[in-house]
Image: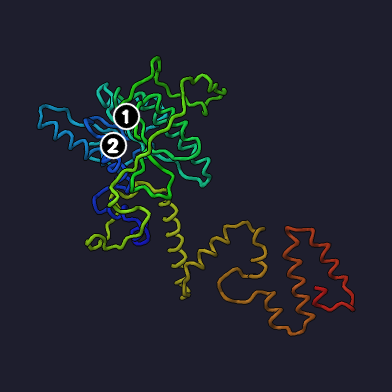
Amino acid sequence: MGKTSKDKRDIYYRKAKEEGWRARSAFKLLQIDSECHIFDGVSKAVDLCAAPGSWSQVLARKLTENYKKALEKGPASKPKIVAVDLQAMAPLEGVIQLQGDITNSSTAEQIIAYFDNSRADLVVCDGAPDVTGLHDMDIFIQSQLLLAALNIATYILRPGGTFVAKIFRAKDVSLLYAQLRIFFPYVYCTKPSSSRNSSIEAFVVCKDYSQPEGYEPNMLNPWMMEDSWDFDKLTGVNRTIVPFIVCGDLNQPDSDMSYPLNYDGKEYKYHEPVQAPIAPPYAEALLMNRKRAEKSVSTFNENNVDVDLSTLDVKAAIECENESSISEIKLISANNDFDNEPSTATKVMQDESSEEEIIIGLQNLYQLDTSDHNTDFSENNDETNECTDETSEVDCF
């Protein structure tokens, strides 16, 4: 996010940096809790797909508050929080980080081991796929991610526990609701006010976890199996209507509106991101571009030539292209350098004033241009040379 564009548009992005949250999504979990009270009595929690860690920050703060309240009543155990993600995440105080795959049963075993062979009171998941722009594909991948989070939750969630996860409200979403209702008698669909109205994202809040009779937790993923799966084996699933709840006070800022920088009587001050990316994929590309620009600048400065970096980038891009695909450029620019000297074909057109020599020069240019990669033009050139004297030179060419 830039220092001005996003800051001016997204008030929750600004507030996240001001209050020390790693991402604006922290407000989503806070607003869900204000309506659904998901942190009541919670001392063990798991954050799936945790990076960059904003939901883990909320868990650490809320569970610490629960611990202090419990100490006032008597002895209490310290809160335990496990954050799981495939990507590395910057450390957080009071949060145990586990870099692993939520579709692997070994990850569930490691989580239970951190809890001293006990199970979690709360499992949250704010994971989402890398959006491709193909909405049907994105919705399908998100639904599979939700089911993967549900699968591992059946391993690590205690009876009566709570499960919160992101969901895309789209066609056939009621099937996902029905699958959740198998394990949770109470399922709600929430839409925090910090979530943009233009987004189809919502969050399912599932309470009072209870396994169906005879169910054994597994990491079954029919879409990844070599043999086709018989879905008729999944009996007892009925389509249900899940109540929809809007979370957050209506007096709170609207995530789809633009607010002035000096909002609510506070003078705006820019804040750096709470946690910068550890190893962003674009870092290597930026370093290569910087080195290339510095090298080009030093070379051109030796000749006392004014340097235009955009021009240098264009030249470098041309040099990297296949020679056959830019033969037109090389024919027009014989020297292929920024010496501003006209090419051979251009000199013919500038120095000679007769129309006949101009046409001959252009014909030679086109013949050279097309001889390497398009032999079909040779027939057209022969037809061009057969023009009669009765035809004007312009029409002939």
* Badge 1 element: strand
The residue most toward the bottom is 353
* Badge 2 element: helix
Q: Which mark is residue 36?
A: 2
Report the Cα–Cα distance between label 2 and label 1. 10 Å
Q: In this rendering, would 114 be left or right of 190? A: left
Q: Name the amino acid type tagged 1.
A: Lys
Closest to the observer: 57 or 243?
243
Q: Quadrant of the C terminus?
A: bottom right
Q: Residues within 10 Å of mark 1 (few under 14, many from 20)?
A: many
Asked whether residue 56 is in view, the answer is no
Asked whether residue 4 is in view, the answer is yes
Q: Position of residue 346 (x, y in %)?
A: 67, 76
Q: Residues within 10 Å of mark 2 (few under 14, many from 20)?
A: some
Number of marks present in the image shown:
2
Q: In this rendering, would 382 be left or right of 66? A: right
Residue that label 1 marks: 207
Q: Position of residue 332 (x, y in %)?
A: 66, 70
Q: Give the residue drawn at x 41%, y 38%.
A: 167
Check the image and report above or below for 267 versus 78: below
Q: Name the amino acid type tagged 2.
A: Cys
Question: Is the residue under label 1 in contact with that under label 2 (CB below 8 Å)?
Answer: yes
Closest to the observer: 127 or 184?
184
Q: Position of residue 60 (x, y in %)?
A: 23, 38
Q: Give the residue drawn at x 23%, y 51%.
A: 19
The residue most toward the top is 214
Q: Give the residue drawn at x 14%, y 34%.
A: 69
Q: Earlier in the sequence, mark 2 or mark 1?
A: 2
Q: Position of residue 6 (x, y in %)?
A: 36, 58
Q: Quadrant of residue 373?
A: bottom right
